[in-house]
Amino acid sequence: MTQDHALQGSEFDGGTRVPAAGTATGAVLPGPAHDGADEPVQLLDHLGVRHAHEHYDALVADVDGAALRKLYEDMVVVRRIDAEATALQRQGELALWPPLLGQEAAQIGSGRALREDDFVFSSYRENAVAYCRGVDLTDLLRVWRGNASSGWDPYSINMATPQVIIGAQTLHATGYAMGILQDGDDAVAMTYFGDGATSQGDVNEAMVFAASYQAPVVFFCQNNHWAISEPVGLQAHVPIARRAPGFGIPSVRVDGNDVLACLAVTREALARARSGGGPTFIEAVTYRMGPHTTADDPKRYRDANELEDWASRDPLARLATLLDSLGLLDADYTDSVKATADAVAAELRQGCLSMPEPEPMDVFKHVYSAPNSWLDRQQDHYERYLASFEQAPQEGSR
Ligand SMILES: Cc1ncc(C[n+]2csc(CCOP(=O)(O)OP(=O)(O)O)c2C)c(N)n1
Ligand SMILES: [Mg+2]
C-alpha cells in the first residue's frame, strides 16, 4: 500500500476516518470543547506541514522555534529510553517492559502542558509523561526489574506510580480532583488510560463523579487501536470521544501523533478545569507500534500493512520535517539531540544494572501506613521461614 493511498483511504477502527493528507482538518470545528467531533484536531500533518487552525493556533502561539526543538528533543529522548529499556528486557535485566513506541507525541504534548502542581494518575505505558514530570530514571525501572513494589514517592514528582489495574487510576484522579475542589486550589488531576480501559466500569464511574462534581480532572485517552490483541473497533463502534458528552463531559478528538495539537488541546482542557469549567475528555488517536509488552508478539494478531500505514504517520518524522523546513534541523542541533539521548540511555542502563538487590523482608515495607497485626503475623512467619534456611545443615556436611 502506498503512503498516499493509505492515508487518504484508510479508516481508524471504529469507523472514523484518517484526515486526508494536506487538509487543515480542524478548521471546521466550532471551537472549544466541541462535544466529540469525529475529525481529530490536527495542526501538523503526517507530511510535516503546519496548518493554520482558527481556534487552536492561539493555544500554541508561544511555541517558537526553540520550543519546537525542545519538543522534538523530548520525543527523541523518550523513544531512546523506550528502546534502551526494551533492550534491557531482552538482555534479561528487566522482567517486562511496556513500550510506548508511536505514542511519543501524545505523551510529550500532553505532559508538557502540565503545571508542576498538577497531579498525574497514569497506566503503565506513560513513561514519557513520567519523564516530563522529572522522574529519576532508575525509579522508572525498579518495578520492571522486580526490585520494588513501587518505583517512586508520588509526591516527589506529583505523579502516582503506574496503575496496572486497567482504568482504576481514573477513579483515583477524580477523587483527587474532588479534593482539589475542597481545598479551593486551582491544580488539575490528569489521568491517562487506553482505548480498552474505556470499557471498564471504573472509567465510566469516574466520568459520572467527575461530571456530577464538575471536578478539575482531564481524562486523556490514548486510543492506540489495541487492547493487547483486541482491536478498538470491537468495543467502540463509534469514536470513543463521543461517549463523554453522554456523561456531560465535553470531549475532543486529537491527532495523537501531532505533538502540537496534543499540546494545544491539553492546554485548553487544563485551563477549563483550572477556571472551574470541570472535566474534559481527550481522545488522542495514535498507534501502538510495538508489542503490548515485551511478553507479547503482535504479529500473531495484526496485519503488517496496518503497522506500515501508521509508520507513515510517525510523530517524530513529521516534526523533523517541519524543523527542517524552518531551517532548524542543522547538524549541530541533531548532534546535540543525539548526545542527550545517548547520555539519558547510558544513565538508564547504569541505574538499572547498579540497582541493589532487595532484601526479602522488604516486601512488607510500605504495605500499610500504620502497624497492622495481621501483617505483623505474616512478617514473623516469613522471618522464621527464612531463618530456617540458615539453620539447615549444609549439603555434604553429613
Ligand atoms: C482490570 C483489569 N482487567 C484486565 C487486565 C489485563 N490487561 C492488561 S493490559 C490490558 C489491555 C489494556 O488496553 P488499553 O486500555 O487499550 O491500554 P494499552 O495497553 O493499549 O495502552 C488488559 C486487558 C488488567 N490489567 N486489569
Ligand atoms: Mg490500547
Image (cartoon, rainbow, N blue to C red):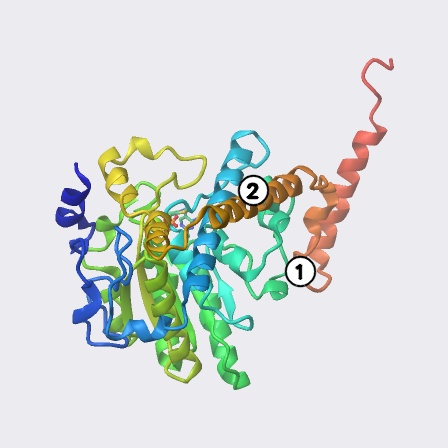
Residue 231 screen position, x and y as percent: 26, 45
Quadrant of the image containing the N terminus:
top left
| Horizontal side, residue 125 vs residue 341: left or right | left
Which image quarter: residue 201? Answer: bottom left
Q: Residue at x 52, y 69 (%)?
A: 119
| Horizontal side, residue 159 vs residue 308: left or right | right
Q: Residue at x 44, y 35 (%)?
A: 295
Disc nearer the start of the sequence (2/1): 2
Viewer-nearest of discs 2 and 1:
2
Which residue position is annotated with label 2? 342
The kind of residue tagged 2 is Asp
Question: Residue 195 or 328: which is nearer the viewer?
Answer: 328
Q: Is residue 167 visible?
A: no
| Horizontal side, residue 47 vs residue 181: left or right | left
Question: Residue 260 or 119: which is nearer the viewer?
Answer: 260
Classify 280 as above or below 339.
Answer: below
Residue 190 screen position, x and y as percent: 45, 67
Q: Residue at x 48, y 58 (%)?
A: 129
Mark-to-mark CA distance, 2 and 1: 39 Å
The kind of residue tagged 1 is Tyr
Question: Residue 65 or 46: which is nearer the viewer?
Answer: 65
Which image quarter: residue 343? Answer: top right
Which mark, by number, is residue 368? 1
Residue 315 screen position, x and y as percent: 35, 51
Quadrant of the image containing the C terminus:
top right
**Disc 1: CA contacts within 10 A as few (<14), some (14-19) or many (>=20):** few
Badge 1 element: loop
